[in-house]
Amino acid sequence: MTCWRPTKKAYFQDNVKLNAFMHETYPAIVKEAKQEDAVIYRGG
């Protein structure tokens, strides 16, 4: 048995989308999780 290889590889990141996620989306997720006393798990 062997590990599966990813079909795509990110050679570069979209900095605009990354900044939007880090400064808008993720803080909203954290705020909602705190309100609901939830735990955030990160997948990779």
Image: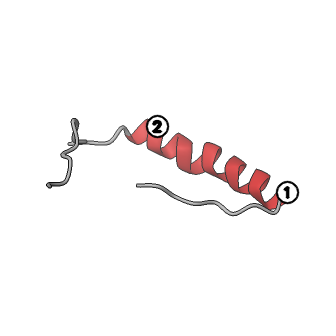
Q: With 30 as the anchor, is 14 left or right in this view?
A: left
Q: Quadrant of the N terminus?
A: bottom left
Q: Residue at x 49, y 45 (%)?
A: 19
Tell me, yes or no, whether the two marked residues, 2 and 1, touch with CB atoms within 8 Å.
Answer: no
Viewer-proximal residue among 39 and 19: 39
Q: Would you place residue 44 above or below residue 7 in this image?
A: below
Q: Work out which residue is located at the far right of the displayed protein and give it.
A: 35
What kind of element bears circle 2? helix
Which residue is painted at 19% across and 54% down in the image?
A: 3
Which sits earlier in the primary sequence, circle 2 or circle 1?
2
In the image, what residue occupies the spot 32% across and 42% down?
13
| Residue holding disc 2 | 17
Mark 1 packing: few (<14 Cα in 10 Å), some, or many (20+)? few
* Residue type marked 2: Lys
What amino acid type is highlighted by mark number 1? Gln
**Identity of the residue drawn at 36% across and 37% down:** 14
Residue 28 x/y as whole percent = 71, 47
Compare residues 35 and 43 and report the one nearer the observer. Answer: 43
Name the residue at the front extreme: 1
x, y (%) of residue 17? 46, 37
Q: Which residue is mark 1?
A: 35
Q: In what element is the residue under mark 1?
A: helix
In x, y percent, where is residue 40? 64, 60
Q: How is the image coloured?
A: secondary structure
